[in-house]
Image (spheres, helix red, strand yellow):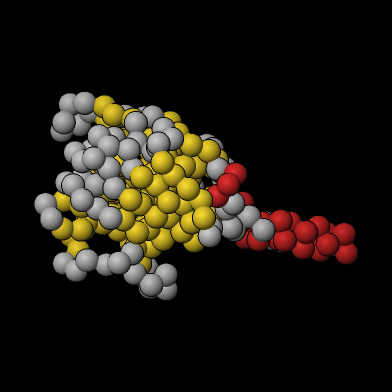
Amino acid sequence: MKKIILSSIILLNLFSGLKAQSLEKMTWFNEPSQWEIKDKKLFMNVTPQSDYWRISHYGFTVDDAPFYYSTYGGEFETKVKITGDYKARFDQMGLMLRIDEQNYIKAGVEFVDGKFNLSTVVTHKTSDWSVIVLEKTPPFVWIKAVRRLDAVEIFYSFDDKDYVMMRNAYLQDNTPVQVGFMAASPDGNGFKATFENFSVKHLPDQRRLEWLKKNQN
């Protein structure tokens, strides 16, 4: 029994150590020409004329915006604080969870028609787009994603305390996911984006928890 308890404590310590993601150990997909990690923040000059979108409505596919990520399996919670100097229509930045070029979720802030929007794009072969218009211009926004089984819940917050759900979307489970931040400037010449306080926290497998409840005797 003591060995089991000790092993459990070791595992808990290992998982707790995974909460903070080291920015220096992450990987670029479509690396921008200018970026810097300083004071545990990622500063990026977003690549002009770049985006992530597949087919629907517009009829084209693009997969060329900057994305800085690490790969995670299982179930987890991730969040990041984002600040952008948005300039042109569709300038955007936020979290991205990506399996491959046909299956991904990107969520964050998008500048459309002179207003700031909380924006989510869910792609499974084709893309969809949902927005929540913000009447005020926040200096920054927190975006959080929680992956449980085959679903991802997306939340936003202005203070990292009170979170509001903005989307619940399907994402295949039991599949490794690239988790990190993306920014795009489809119509513009790029903008300055800052990502900070990025973390990933592993969660106990939901199916196993349910199995344990049913078989605890």
Residue 87 position (above or below residue 52) = below
Q: Nearer the viewer, residue 112 or 152?
A: 112
Q: How many marks?
A: 0
Q: Quadrant of the C terminus?
A: bottom right
Q: Do we see residue 96 in this rendering?
A: no
Residue 120 pos. (x, y %): 29, 49
> Residue 159 is drawn in which quadrant?
bottom left
Q: Residue at x 44, y 44 (%)?
A: 35
Asked if residue 52 is positioned above or below residue 143 in the image, the reply reads: above
Q: Position of residue 210 (x, y in %)?
A: 58, 56
Taking depth in this image into account, of 187 and 163 the one nearest to the observer is: 187
Farthest right residue in view:
2
Q: Quadrant of the N terminus?
A: bottom right
Q: Going 65% across and 61% down the picture, which residue do you hit? A: 16
Residue closer to the observer: 23 or 54: 23
Residue found at x 53% / y 58%: 40
Indicate left or right for 97 with 60 as reference: right
Task: Give the quarter of the image for residue 4.
Answer: bottom right
140 or 1: nearer the viewer: 140
Q: Residue furthest left?
A: 113
Q: Position of residue 72 (x, y in %)?
A: 56, 43
Q: From the top left corner, tell me how far across and down residue 17 is, in percent.
A: 67, 58
Does the image show residue 66?
yes
Decide if residue 195 is on the left or right side of residue 116.
Answer: right
Instruction: Give the image quarter of residue 172.
Output: top left
Is the residue 84 above or below the residue 65 in the image? below
